[in-house]
Amino acid sequence: MPSHLYAEIEAAARDPDKVLIETQDGRAITYRQAFAHAGRFANALRALGVEVGDRVAVQVEKSPEVILLLLGCLRAGAVFLPLNTAYTPAELDYFLSDAEPALLVCDPAAKPALAEIATRRGVGAVETLDARGEGSLADKAAAASPDFADAERGPDDLAAILYTSGTTGRSKGAMLTHENLASNARTLRDTWAFTARDVLIHALPTFHTHGLFTATNTILFSGASMLFLPKFDADEILRLMPRATSMMGVPTFYVRLLQHEGLTSEATAHMRLFVSGSAPLLAETHRAFAERTGHAILERYGMTETNMNTSNPYEGERIAGTVGFPLPGIDLRVVDPQTGEGLATDEIGMIEVRGPNVFKGYWRNPEKTKAEFREDGFFVTGDLGKIDPRGYVHIVGRGKDLVITGGYNVYPKEVESEIDALPGVVESAVFGVPHPDLGEGVTAAIVLEPGASLDEAQVKAALADRLARFKQPKRVIVLPELPRNTMGKVQKAALRERYAGLYAGGGAAG
C-alpha cells in the first residue's frame, strides 16, 4: 500500500503541468514540480535520520516550501507537526518534550535559541527554512534526488499532529490520520463544488489547520491552483480577484475588505465563493459584504481535532449567524452537558460529532482521549450550540465560556447579539469573572465605531428591556480592540484574566 493521503493527492492531479502554486513575485510551481520537490524533501528527511512514524516539527514562516515539505513528509511516512510562528522558545520546549520529534525545522534567525533546547530534548537534527523557502533543509533537498519509494502508510496511520491552542491548560496534540484528512478534503471538494478550474486566493498561515489542510487539501484534491500570499493584504487580494474564483479567510479578512473602497460587485465579479471560518463571523459583516458585492459569505464550522464538521450550503440559503448543516458522512448532535441526553430543537447544549474526519485521539494522553469520546464514538467538541427548526447549526460559545451567575446559565452569544445590534457597537465579548455574591458576574467588553459616544450606562439601559435581569452585564468595558489569536479568534481567557478582580475592587475597570 502506498502513502494513503499522498497517493490520492497525486491521483487528483490529472494535468501534472498545471500550476499548483503561484507566489506574489511570480514564481510558479506545477504539480509535476511539486511532486518532484516532495521526493527531494523525502530523501533529505531520510538522510537526516527521519524514519516512518517520526515527527517532523516545523516552525517557519509561510512559503511554498512548507507545502512541499508536508508532501515530502507524507511520502517519507513522517508525521507533520506544524507550530505557530508566535510560540516562544519556552513554549517550543514543551512541544519538543511532548512530541519528541526526530527533526526540528525553524527559521534561520531562531536556530541559535532553539538548537540548545532541541539538543536537550533529544531532537536528532535542526534544519532551517525561511520565508523565501531558503535554508539548510532547502539546500539538502535541492541536492537530493526527486525519485523516492513512498513509504507504505494506510488510512489509519498518522499524517499530522496539531496542537490545540491550550486555552484550558497545556496544549494537547491532536492525532490526525491519513483518512481523517483525505475524507475531509474529498467532502469539501464536492460540497463546495471545487474543480481543476478553480483558483484559490491563499492568504492564511500554514501552521493552522485552516490554511494547511482545509484550504490546501481542498485544492490538491481538486487539481486546482493557489495564488499564494505571505499574509493578508487587501490591496493585493483585490488585485488578484479577477484571476481567482475563491477565497478562504477568517472574519478579520472580510472586515478589512469591507473597509477598502475597492470592494465592489465589479471587483468580485470573477469570484464564485468566499468561505469564512476559524472564528465567528458577525451577522453584520455577512450582511454588509452581501450588500457591497452580491456574494453571501459561506460560513462553516470546524476545529483542530476534526477539520470541518458543518457548512452552510453552496447552493441554498446561507444564513448569517449559523454554520449550516452537518457535512455528508458526519453525524452531529446536541446533548445536555451533564447527562449526555439528546436535546430538542432550539435547545442549547454540547455539540458532539462523529465521522471519518474525527481525529484518532490526543498524543500520548489516553486519559484525555477517553474523557472526550462517548462510548458510541461521538467526540465531545466543547462547543455549545443548538439546531434550529430548519436544521441549521448555531454555535453559541465554548463550554468553558458559559457564565454561571446566581445559579443561572448565561450563554455569551445571546448577550453579544443584543449588544452588537446597538448603534455604534462594532463587536463585543461577554465573559464571566468572579463575583462575591453571584459566583460569576456577567461582563461585557465592547469596541465602538470611530466617533461613537456610547458609554456603559447607555449600554445597560438599552439592554434593560431586551434581556432577563440575570443576563444583563454588571459591567461594560469599552476597549480599542478585543484580544485575538493569530486566526482572529477572540481570546476570552485573556479578558477573564485581565478583569479577574473587577468585582473585588482590585481589578482593572476599563
Image (tube, grey):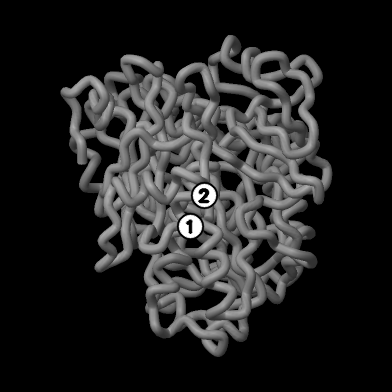
- Quadrant of residue 92 in the image? top left
Q: Within 10 Å of the Cα at label 2, are there few (<14), some (14-19), or many (20+) other Cα atoms?
A: some
- Quadrant of residue 435 in the image? top left
The residue positioned 16% from the left and 23% from the top of the image is 506
Tell me if I can see residue 100 in this picture: no
Residue closest to the eye, 457 or 224: 457
x and y percent of residue 395 in the render? 61, 42
**Type of amino acid under label 2:** Ser
**Type of amino acid under label 1:** Ala
Is 443 placed above or below 419 here? Answer: above
x and y percent of residue 459 in the render? 36, 49
Which residue position holds label 2? 417
The tag on residue 421 is: 1
Residue closest to the eye, 178 or 163: 163
Q: Secondary structure at mark 2?
A: helix
Of the 4 image quadrants, the one containing the C terminus is top left
Is residue 401 shown left or right of residue 434? right
x and y percent of residue 164 in the render? 48, 32
Q: Residue furthest bottom?
A: 266
Q: Residue furthest left?
A: 506
Q: Secondary structure at mark 1?
A: loop
Rounded to the nearest angstrom, the CA distance separating label 2 from label 1 is 6 Å
x and y percent of residue 486 in the render? 38, 48
Tag count in the figure? 2
The residue positioned 66% from the left and 15% from the top of the image is 338
Residue closest to the eye, 202 or 374: 374
